[in-house]
Image (spheres, helix red, strand yellow):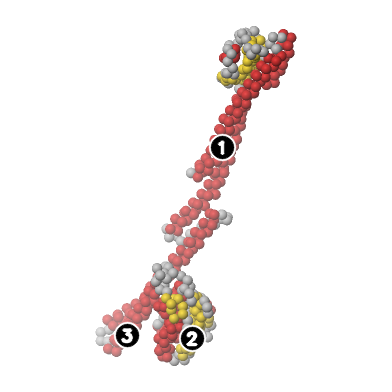
Amino acid sequence: MLFVAVFLIGILPLIVYSLVISSNLKTYFKESKEKELLYEANKVAVSIQKNNYLFDNKLRGQFIEEIDQKSEEEGFRIIVVDSLGVAVADTNRSAVGKMCVVPEILVALDGKDDANLRESEGVVYASAYIENDFSQKTGVVLLVMSFDEVNSLLEELNHNWLTVTVIISVILVFIAFFITQAIFVPLNNILTTIQRISNGQLHNRLEVQGHNELSQVADAINIMTQQLEHVDTARAEFVSNVSHELKTPLSSIKVLSESLLLQEDMPVEMYREFMQDINSEVDRMTNIINDLLSLVKLDYREEGVLNIEDTDLSELVASIVKRINPLAAKKNIGLFLDNNKDVMIEADGMKLTLALSNLVENAVKYTPDGGTVTVTVDADHQNAYFTVKDTGIGISPEEQTKIFNRFYRVDKTRDRETGGTGLGLAITHSTVMMHNGSIKVVSAEGEGAAFIVRLPIKYQGVRANES
Ligand code: ADP
């Protein structure tokens, strides 16, 4: 289709152009020849009139010589007819002395001076009458010229045009072929790959060649597919993690309840102990599900998901510290709050409380008995800073890049002890990101850890309470 279109677009103007040119040329040639003939006829008639060639026998010879020469040079026949219609001179000689019955002569001799140009069967007749001094018509000059020459010239021209058109057509066929190849082949590739991708084969990539619009499209599609593949892998990983996380407490519950069912005379203490274990496994599952729900809510990164309000960060952090204090006290950990300023920010207070609590809880959780945890709140004119510094077990540099991933835990065996789900830092990270802030960790294994959160004082995104 494109091939035919390119070919036609190329060849049609050429054909139209050649037709127009050929017909214009024909008209131009004819008209200029006709004008020339008329002019010559008049010239001959005037010269006869002036020199009285017709009636002076002496001069006639010279005159005939002159018109013979002109006829030979210009390629037309000159016939001079007297007032009776008898040819007195003819450059072809054949008509001399004979009556000439052509419309021009009859009309001119009749005293009318129109019809001085006529074309019939490829021959042009141009006439001019000769007058005497008393304005009487004494004869007629008739110029006859065949258009064969012009016609054959035009034919030759047409033939040449045809040759040029054929050559250009062949060239156009090649150009059209290459253009369609250059556009269609990559487009077809793109189409098949997109179809494969939409069928779920996300590993497919387009081959990017050259540097043009099509290669840019291919590049963009590759990036998009890569993202899709990434999201797909992350989703699969997440589902598998969730299943795995829930499977562990479920298996424990299954084992514990089966033992209860199978053993008939079980002492009440043991019974109670098993039930306590089942209860704590159920608590664990509830924690995981609650954390998952919080994350899913944060995952809806639609605009306006945050309920932004003027929030007193100092007060918010103070209440977190107050709530976690008993936990710290249990482990004999000194939990300190360092906040000299009254820091106000635009934030979603509820979500921020959960996010920052996770950090303080972790600090207490991963600090051995007798350690210290210091929480600091500070601000400059653009950002507020929240820091939790502990003297705990610390995090190695390799682990620091992974701890914000969902379900990631450095030491899986400590799960049961700490009650962690591996989702806390993922929740904190998502919340901080949604506030257009940043979070970083500074730590070394065995040397404590510091989590530093930066939050813009003025929230930049869209608010749920606005939409
Ligand atoms: P968890 O529920 O296991 O605490 P988090 O997502 O909150 O899950 O933390 C992920 C992992 O990061 C933890 O399992 C722990 O290994 C590590 N971590 C988090 N905070 C600290 C900290 N203050 N000191 C040492 N390790 C920490």
The residue type indicated by label 3 comes to Gln
Look at label 2 and name its amino acid.
Answer: Asn
How far across and how far down the image is residue 201, in percent? 45, 60
Residue lying at the far left in this picture: please name it: 264
Q: Is the residue marked by circle 2 packed among few (<14), some (14-19), or many (20+) residues within 10 Å?
A: some
Mark 3, mark 2: which one is toward the viewer?
2
Name the one closer to the observer, 343 or 52: 52
Instruction: Give residue 151's quadrant in the image.
Output: top right
Q: Which residue is mark 1?
A: 14
> Disc 3 marks which residue?
276
Q: Position of residue 59 (x, y in %)?
A: 73, 11
Q: Which mark is residue 59?
A: none
Give the residue drawn at x 67%, y 19%.
43
Separation of residues labelled 1 and 3 (CA atoms): 94 Å
Q: Secondary structure at mark 3?
A: helix
Residue at image position (49%, 59%) is: 221
Q: Are marks 3 and 2 in contact (CB under 8 Å)?
A: no
Residue bearing the label numbered 2:
339
Q: Picture coordinates of residue 22 (x, y %)?
A: 58, 31
Quarter location, residue 99: top right
Where does the C terminus fall, quadrant-wise?
Answer: bottom left
Comes first in the chain, label 1 or label 2 = 1
